[in-house]
């Protein structure tokens, strides 16, 4: 996806159907996450939409916009659990990915959601500042060793996989 689709802000809107980004071969992180989900679920791999933020560093050359919300996908992989994939930036989601909400797609996790009565107008302004801490953060290039799941965890994982399919 990273090589096939161009990152192009204002190409689509939050209400644009997936077909629009597919036809144009460009869009934003939300489009890339929806397309990846549409490709992965038919393979029998449970996956979910993740909304949050990405900490941008100069040396990373991320395609997504600095100071904007971000979206990626988590897939439930046997023996590993939920693993995050960022198709916009061609990354495994790690310590720079800040998860805010998880759902089936964007409609489950919009930044604002509510009910209006009568005449109403809405606007959203967000200010987010992400800075590194002094805490030790493992190397991004290496996935940590993961112990095999306990029988209870394996059963829960199997139930989650069935629910996602």
Image (cartoon, rainbow, N blue to C red):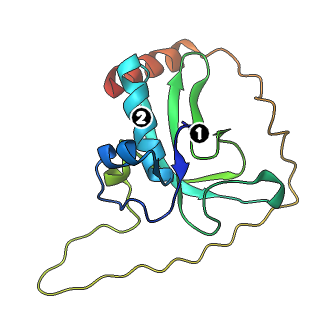
Please give the name of the residue rendered at 57% of the width and 46% of the height, measured from the top-left corner. Answer: 88
Instruction: Choose between 150 and 25: the one closer to the eye.
Output: 25
The local secondary structure at tag 1 comes to loop
Q: Residue furthest front?
A: 24
Mark 1 Cα-neighbour bin, 10 Å: few <14, some 14–19, many ≥20: some
Instruction: Choose between 6 and 51: the one closer to the eye.
Output: 6
Residue 34, position as x, y percentages in the image: 40, 42
Q: Is residue 11 above or below residue 119?
A: above
Residue 105, position as x, y percentages in the image: 36, 46
Please give the name of the residue rendered at 54% of the width and 37% of the height, measured from the top-left corner. Answer: 4
Residue on which the image places disc 2: 37
> Where's the N terminus, which quadrant?
top right
> Where's the C terminus, which quadrant?
top left
Q: Is residue 148 above or below residue 47?
A: above
The local secondary structure at tag 2 comes to helix
Q: Is residue 101 at all visible to an observer of this figure?
A: no
Judge from the rendering whether residue 154 lies leftward or rightward of residue 107; answer left or right.
right
Please give the name of the residue rendered at 64% of the width and 39% of the height, measured from the top-left corner. Answer: 90
Q: Is residue 150 above or below residue 55?
A: above
Residue 147, position as x, y percentages in the image: 70, 18
Question: Marks 1/2: CA distance?
Answer: 14 Å
Residue 159, position as x, y percentages in the image: 38, 20
Residue on which the image places disc 1: 2
């Amino acid at each position: 996806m990273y090589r096939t689709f161009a990152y192009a802000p204002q190409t689509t809107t939050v209400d644009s159907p997936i077909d629009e980004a597919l036809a144009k071969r460009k869009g934003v992180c939300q489009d890339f996450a929806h397309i990846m989900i549409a490709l992965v679920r038919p393979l029998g791999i449970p996956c979910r939409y993740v909304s949050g933020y990405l900490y941008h560093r100069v040396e990373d050359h991320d395609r997504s916009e600095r100071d904007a919300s971000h979206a990626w996908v988590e897939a439930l992989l046997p023996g590993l659990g939920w693993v995050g994939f960022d198709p916009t930036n061609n990354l495994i989601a790690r310590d720079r990915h800040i998860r805010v909400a998880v759902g089936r797609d964007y409609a489950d996790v919009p930044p604002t959601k509510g009910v209006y009565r009568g005449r109403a107008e809405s606007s959203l302004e967000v200010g987010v500042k992400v800075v590194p801490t002094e805490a030790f953060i493992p190397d991004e290039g290496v996935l940590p060793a993961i112990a095999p799941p306990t029988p209870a965890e394996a059963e829960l994982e199997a139930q989650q996989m069935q629910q996602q399919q």
